[in-house]
Image: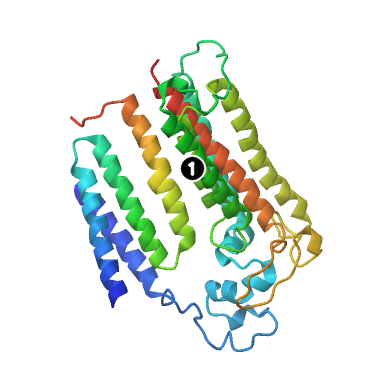
Amino acid sequence: MRLASFLSLVLIAAFLFVGILRLHPVGEPLGNPDVFKDRGDAITDIKNVDTMDDYYLRNGQTETGSNNLVASVVFDYRAFDTLGEATVLFIVVSSISMLFFTMIKRKGPETSGVSRIGEFPGGVSRVITFGSFLLYILIITFGIYLVVHGHLSPGGGFQGGAVMASATALLLISSLMTRNVQKTKKIFSFFESLGLTLFIGIGFVGIGVSFLSNFLANGNPLLFGKAIAFGPNPGYLVSAGTLPLLSLAIGMEVFFGLSIILVTMYHAAKDE
Amino acid sequence: MISSVIFILLSIVMLVTAVISLYFRDLLASVVSYSVMSLVLTVMFFHLDAPDVAIAEAGIGAALTVCIFVIAIKLTRRREE
């Protein structure tokens, strides 16, 4: 058994190293220079391109209107994979809250809602409460920035949602969150389901071409359709078509899903 | 030159914290060591021009996983038998 696990580890490492040998060098993304010689029209002839990453690098900006090529792959070219990941997260959240929700002692609805700052809620010091409140605002702002600018700068729905969910932990340790866990969980799971439903709904709107096709890109500038040029440029907030909308949906799903995990586990572990 | 030296140093710190987190009997200390490893890994991802992965690692690896581990330790036992 030990030998088998060791052998499989060596095999996986060997495959990864073979994959690394085929990567572009760090800082030199342009693999085949001939492909990038003419910077005019997008390459429609796939035969001109050596590998898939060359195609993304050459056509990603002009086809999707997104300056962040990682986001263009995650939410446009491979959006169906993202739907699978989001579904996995949804199932994980459902099963974890099922496991831990039975452990929460049901003691009837508690009267106090959100505790005010400086009231020493639950015996927590005022320094912790107020500091957590200040940090909460900063972290949530950064998370919203990551989600909204997912198609322009590094970030996107998953990253922004995870950053915002770490702010929920701050709320929990400072007792600023409402103590009625049933109500909290109901609200959070509503918004989590809304995020996933929004993702699938946007996918179905573009079904004239294919499921999850980017039907808004390079169209009406008022509907996220502003076209951008190839090469380094700051980009526009209203470009990239459905990409910002999908990013927003995923951000909502990840934030509320991870928050549900934290809230249910925290209340199950809390002894009163 | 200087950047590769920093990179090797960070890799050593990451390896040491990873091994330490395996060998601690106190699980809370082990989780803190794991968090330090995630933080160093974040810096390394940023150094390798992968800010997307760095943000995800900082949010999930260094913050959320540690929170969930701490809650799980509170639900079970703090010391490994």
Vertical side of A38 occupied by A20: above or below: above
Query: Label 1, on which residue?
Result: A135
Residue depicted at 50% across the width and 13% down the height: A106
Q: Give percent across and percent down for residue A206.
A: 75, 55
Of residues A62 and B71, the one nearer the viewer is: B71
Please state if A95 lies on the left or on the right of A65 as rendered. left
Q: Give percent across and percent down for residue A102.
A: 47, 19
Vertical side of B68 occupied by A67: above or below: below
Q: Quadrant of residue A126?
A: top left
Q: Give percent across and percent down for residue A68.
A: 58, 65
Looking at the rendered structure, the kind of residue marked 1 is Leu
Vertical side of A73 occupied by B71: above or below: above
Q: Give percent across and percent down for residue B5.
A: 26, 71
Q: Tell me the crowding category of disc 1: few under 14, some 14 to 19, or many 20 or more residues within 10 angstroms, Cα based.
A: some
Of residues A149 and A125, the one nearer the viewer is: A125
Q: What colour-coding does the image apply?
A: rainbow
Please state if A2 lies on the left or on the right of A184 as rendered. left
